[in-house]
Image (tube, helix red, strand yellow):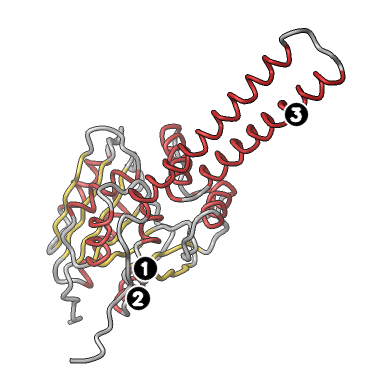
Amino acid sequence: MKNKEKNFMSAVIYVYNAENRIEYFLNMILKMLEDNFEHSEIICVNDCSEDNSVEKIKNVSGNAVNTSIAVLNMSYFHGLEMAMNAGLDLAIGDFVFEFDTTYADFEKEEIMKTYYKALEGYDIVCASPDKKEKFSSRCFYQLFEKFSELSYKMNTESFRILSRRVINRIRSLNKTVPYRKAVYASCGLKTSLIVYKSIAETKDIEKTDKKEKKYKTHLAVDSLILFTDVGYRFSIAMTELMMFMSIFMIGYSIITYLIAHPVAGWTTTILFLSVVFFGLFGILTVIIKYLQLLVELVFRRKHYTFESIQKLTK
């Protein structure tokens, strides 16, 4: 008889209109947990699905022997990040698997590979398919890496495993987690990536509806603003451009007054407006800097982070 792992394992699964695939996916996760762990739980986060996903989950729950299966029904559509945060808050395992999708383009053996990697001392182990990323995803990750200070390379991930230590640290750093990948990458703990061979064709993978596409677009914009310097640099560049144009108009109005003799009052009006707008954009620069500092304090560097402590003497 195979010796099972003593660690309590939790699995949090995001479910949204997944009736066509949730039974297969959930049975795979259930078998993996019961074959390898003495104690485990599965939390299915139903993000207000409009199909029979919950009924399918209830059908599979009858196959569980040593694994607790629960369904967390969200009050309305929250989107992936908030829904998974809710599921993570309920998880009690020593380690937690996060499955952001129910599309299984990997063998169940790949799941245990991330667990064994975590036992080597990694607090976060992510699993990413070896297929080419979507153009939009590639652009987003490149922007994120260029305008952030994270050393961790962002990838399209199917699932990941978290230690209890990283969950506790994230909760101490932020009351809300608007984008988990960015928070995980900046928490300061050891992270590893496993690339697996995708067993599904690209055409068979995840088709999102309008609600999900809208949510993902808003999430991408919000994440770039909160966790990178994209918004700050763009705002500063535009403000500096407007200030330069104000200075140009001041010079232009003076030269026009000396050379062309414009209509009475024109030079005074242009000078007044140019000075006013120059001062206004100067104030906006200060306001933007204050807003950037607030974002830094609340979402990025609320506390210091460290990877580990080594005690050198007894």
Q: Please report whichever mark, 2 or 3, sits nearer to the chain's N-terminal start.
A: 2
In the image as oriented, which residue stretches furthest toward the right?
A: 259
> Looking at the image, which is closer to me, 130 or 299?
299
Which residue is drawn at the image coordinates 51% and 44% (left, top)? 232
Q: Pointer 1 and pointer 2: residues touching (CB < 8 Å)? A: yes
Residue that mark 1 sits on = 125
Q: Amino acid at mark 3?
A: Gly
> Looking at the image, which is closer to me, 236 or 100?
236
Q: Secondary structure at mark 1?
A: strand
Report whether 313 appears left or right of 204.
left
Query: Marks 3 and 1, Cα distance to the nearest angstrom?
Result: 59 Å
Q: Amino acid at mark 1?
A: Val
Residue that mark 2 sits on = 117
Residue that mark 3 sits on = 251
How far from the left and from the top, in percent, is residue 118? 31, 74
Which residue is drawn at the image coordinates 67% and 29% (left, top)? 246
